[in-house]
Image (cartoon, grey):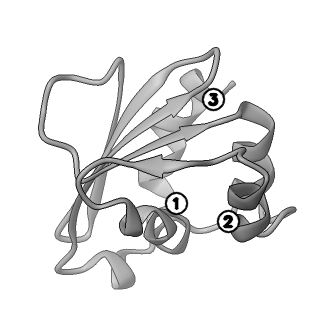
Amino acid sequence: MIGQVMPTMMPLALDTARARDVGIAFDLAVRGGPRLAVVIEDGTATVTRDVPPRAYDCRITAAPTAFLLVSFRRTPLWKAVARGGIPAGGRRPWLAPRLSRLIATP
């Protein structure tokens, strides 16, 4: 589901007001599933499957269950991070929580 739906739905769920003047590139890897490049620039989002080479600001490696529970606001992000379900890394890992604030809940 994540690899098929997210590239289409995430750009539609972007909070354009919050994303205005934002420039962040996320490498989102779902364990046992796809890797997605989520690029937010000036109020628009582009999600590409099979991450192309690029300098990403933040890499998020997520367990599928933890990712979906946080995405649908069924579990707080801090709890998933504390349990090891959604660790962040890369050049600017502190940007990881911004992704959930920029993408609205379905």
| 18 in relation to 47, above or below | below
Could you tell me residue 57's position as x and y percent? 23, 53
Could you tell me residue 4's position as x and y percent? 57, 22
Mark 2–mark 1 CB contact (< 8 Å): yes
The Cα atoms of the two marked residues, 3 and 2, are separated by 15 Å
- Residue drawn at (72%, 32%), measured in percent from left and top? 64
Mark 1 residue crowding within 10 angstroms, few (<14) / some (14–19) / many (20+): some
Q: Which mark is residue 58?
A: none
Where is the C terminus found, in terms of image quarters?
A: bottom right
| Local SS, label 3 | helix
The single residue placed furthest to the left in the displayed view is 54
Q: Which residue is mark 2?
A: 105
Could you tell me residue 28's position as x and y percent? 45, 38
Mark 1–mark 3 CB contact (< 8 Å): no
| 34 in relation to 89, above or below | above
Side of 19 relative to 70 (left or right): left
Amino acid type shown at disc 2:
Thr
Mark 3 residue crowding within 10 angstroms, few (<14) / some (14–19) / many (20+): some
| 10 in relation to 62, above or below | below
Amino acid type shown at disc 1:
Ala
Where is the N terminus found, in terms of image quarters?
A: top right
Picture quadrant where residue 24 is located? bottom left
Q: Which mark is residue 13?
A: 1
Could you tell me residue 96's position as x and y percent? 45, 62
Q: Which mark is residue 2?
A: 3
Q: Earlier in the sequence, mark 3 or mark 2?
A: 3
84, 100: nearer the viewer: 84
Amino acid type shown at disc 3:
Ile
Picture quadrant where residue 49 is located? top left
